[in-house]
Image (cartoon, rainbow, N blue to C red):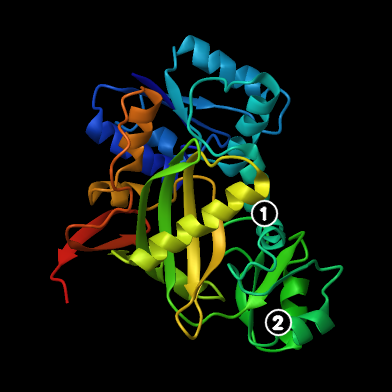
Amino acid sequence: MNILILGIGGPTPRSIAKRLRTIYPKANLIGTDINAKAIGFFMPDLLNKSVLIPRATHPDYFKTIETIIEQENIDFAFVQPEQEVKAWGEYFNIHGNYPCPTLIPPVEHVNELMDKAAMADLFSGTGFIPKTLRITPATPKFKEVASEIGYPCWIRASIGSGGLGALKLSRKEELEAWLFIHKAVPAFTISKYLTGRHLANQMLYIDGQCVANAGLHCAEYVMADIAPSKVTGNTSYGLLLNEKKLLEKCEEVMDFVQKATGVKANGVYSFDFKEDDLGNLLVTEINIRHMAYTGILAECGFDLISKTVEILQDKFTIPKEHKYYFDKNYIFLRDVDIEPIVLDVPFC
């Protein structure tokens, strides 16, 4: 089995590669990245071969990818970087197929969900998200922020991980200062500040049908003390959850996405929610790829990595129950420069 893993410098593709090494020890793993210093290139026993490639927007990108696929006799690919997910989706719409078999969301979903401002427009009036405004450093909309959102509010970059450009704002002067500091960020979203838990999930869809769905609580964040918002893109302490309400909400939202776009869901979707003062779940982000904790979930029984391989090999059987409930009360700990630790603790 020859497997291509794109973006091997990132924590999520590395997590996928490690899991593949565990469950398919004889697999031939070829990793790519746009950065010659990508750490995945240099990790012992992670890959069989490393290849430096151009960015997905470069005119030679697909020529390079197709050469790798041909030379390495690639069976299928894990496409993780969002720009590459988008590029492969556009390739499919032009050619009617991917460069090699893969399992990713359709580009119509990528375009609506990758940009948080576009996602806010998609969900406007649904009640799935908190009231949200799109602003830029050139058009800050100070009056609208005060009248429509109010303070405190939450600002973050429109594109990027959940902690990028994020901050709790208490007054207009803080908004002015934050936009001045981040003049290079092209667009932000501003929404009501939510006080409840940060919950998340991963889902797997095949041709519009949800076949796997599990949730977790992101309780604390890696290197939170150095971030002004105290929120970063990675969870340092999390709890795996058996909360039916969370799983049902995710599927309700995805039903809307499919209906609104007219395109069936396919591949992995990863949600982030925040609870409001009353415990209502509001979507803050939907990622069109695996998240960094995908290997941890797999270790605890919810393995979307092996399921993806089975689907691509036409060996997957759709389960009778797709909502996944963990058999133990799992927690996990993550930090910089150390492997994650998974523990199970007694149920309360």
**Callout 1 secondary element:** loop
Q: Residue at x 33, y 33 (%)?
A: 46
Q: Residue at x 38, y 34 (%)?
A: 308
* Residue 233 seen: no
- What amino acid is found at the position of numbered circle 2 in the picture? Ile
Q: Which mark is residue 115?
A: 1
Q: Quadrant of residue 256?
A: bottom right
* Residue 260 seen: yes
Question: In the rendered view of the protein, which quadrant contains the C terminus?
Answer: bottom left
**Callout 2 secondary element:** helix
| Vertical side of 51 occupied by 117: above or below | below
Comes first in the chain, label 1 or label 2: 1
- Residue toward you, 10 or 298: 298
- Residue toward you, 207 or 110: 207
The residue carrying mark 2 is: 149
| Vertical side of 218 occupied by 342: above or below | above
- Residue toward you, 163 or 208: 208
**321 lies left or right of 260:** left
Q: Residue at x 64, y 22 (%)?
A: 62
| Image location (x, y in percent) of residue 286 | 55, 55
Cα gap from disc 1 to disc 2, whole angstroms: 20 Å
Q: Quadrant of residue 340?
A: bottom left
- What amino acid is found at the position of numbered circle 1 in the picture? Asp
Q: Looking at this view, name the residue that lies furthest to the left.
A: 346
Check contact, mark 1 vs mark 2: CB within 8 A. Answer: no
**41 lies left or right of 20:** right
**66 lies left or right of 327:** right
For the residue carrying disc 1, how many other residues have a C-alpha within 10 Å: few (<14), some (14-19), or many (20+)? many
